[in-house]
Amino acid sequence: MSEITEKKRIFSGVQPSGKLTLGNYLGAIRNFETLQDAYECLYCVVDLHAITVRQNPAELRRQTLEVLAQYLACGLDPQKSTLFIQSHVPAHAELAWILNCYTMFGELSRMTQFKDKSAKHADNVNAGLFDYPVLMASDILLYQTDLVPVGSDQLQHIELTRNVAQRFNGVYSDTFTMPEPYIAKTGARIMSLQDPMRKMSKSDENANSFILLMDKPEDIMRKFKRAITDSEGTIRRGEGKEGISNLIAIYGLATGRTAEEVEAEFAGQGYAAFKPAVGEAVVELLRPIREKTEDLLKNKDYLEQVYTEGAQRASYMARKTLDKVYRKVGFIKR
Ligand code: TRP
């Protein structure tokens, strides 16, 4: 290990159960390309987490590859970053079992995501759903992760991860690096096109409220034309103008302009001119990503090579931690 040049390690988990939105892209994924030079990055498609709610097997397979392809299309370089699929590295499940024995029932009962999801899937409140945060803690702790980029909805899980790590370290001496949430400085918060007080989310019932990276140009244009605005009619940010403020932010990010520049550019113009302009800017922003993703999805051999090599690298790192953990808890060396 070269102590001087050692970069901090980032672990990021992404669910294969949903599609990536413009919000995900502008808020986080867009920065991955630069992040991978400053940090040692691991990007994991968390299929084990996905089955805590019912999945269609064929869909799950397709979505897993699609997420991987989208990440590559957004500029992740498999030579620099480790891209892999969670179920390909058994150490995640192995460490999860051990950490289960160092996580309290009461702690897991307090997780708001568990409460939300069990209300939403009342017919399938399975043990995996309850245990979800322990598997997530394992993902993070296996790689001696320093930083975890997450949205605010996942902060409670990071806090739990830290508590479990601290408990284990306390009993057995230092074993796990204490991870911290990574809040991107450059990330933007993109709001729903139908309710600009809420964050853009793919789980929104109204498909007009979000833009997917894989949306066709005509769908993107339609969604922007229908975006909720206000009756005032001027292109400026302000109180009661959350819809237009959001469109200004999106247009600015898509074209590399500041909000002030966007306001100046559209001074004196109305929404009928502005909305399609935002749509077109987003179409052009996403076009190369969608096309690259489609190409990659046709090249299954390449994707297989990426995730196979990724799993090999990840397994090697994970094994080191797991061996240490097994030794500390008193298992016989195999
Ligand atoms: N729970 C995260 C989410 O729903 C996904 C996830 C699983 C994750 N394991 C992780 C995120 C480890 C960061 C680190 O978004």
Image (cartoon, rainbow, N blue to C red):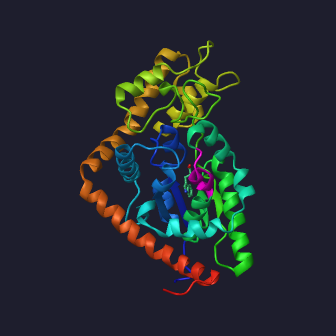
Residue at image coords 41%, 39%: 213
Residue at image coords 43%, 65%: 82
State whether residue 316 is above or below residue 93.
below
Viewer-side residue, 89 vs 185: 89
Looking at the image, can residue 173 be seen? no
Task: Please give left or right for residue 26 compared with residue 65 in the image.
Answer: right
State whether residue 264 is above or below residue 321.
above
Q: Any magenta on residue 187?
A: no
Chief SS of the magenta region: helix
Viewer-side residue, 80 vs 278: 80
Q: Any magenta on residue 131?
A: yes
- Indicate the position of residue 163 as horizontal and vertical percent values: 72, 64
Residue at image coords 41%, 57%: 76
- Indicate the position of residue 99 as horizontal and vertical percent values: 63, 68
Q: Residue 4 occupies which quadrant of the picture?
A: bottom right
Viewer-side residue, 276 vs 14: 14
- Indicate the position of residue 48 as horizontal and vertical percent values: 48, 56
Looking at the image, can residue 95 be seen? yes
- Numbered-mark total: 0
Task: Please give left or right for residue 124 compared with residue 62 in the image.
Answer: right
- Indicate the position of residue 161 as horizontal and vertical percent values: 66, 62
Quadrant of picture, ligand 1: bottom right
Task: Please give left or right for residue 114 compared with residue 323 in the image.
Answer: right
Residue at image coords 68%, 25%: 238
State whether residue 220 is above or below residue 306.
above
Viewer-side residue, 263 vs 22: 22
Residue range of the region highlighted in magenta in the rendering = 125-133
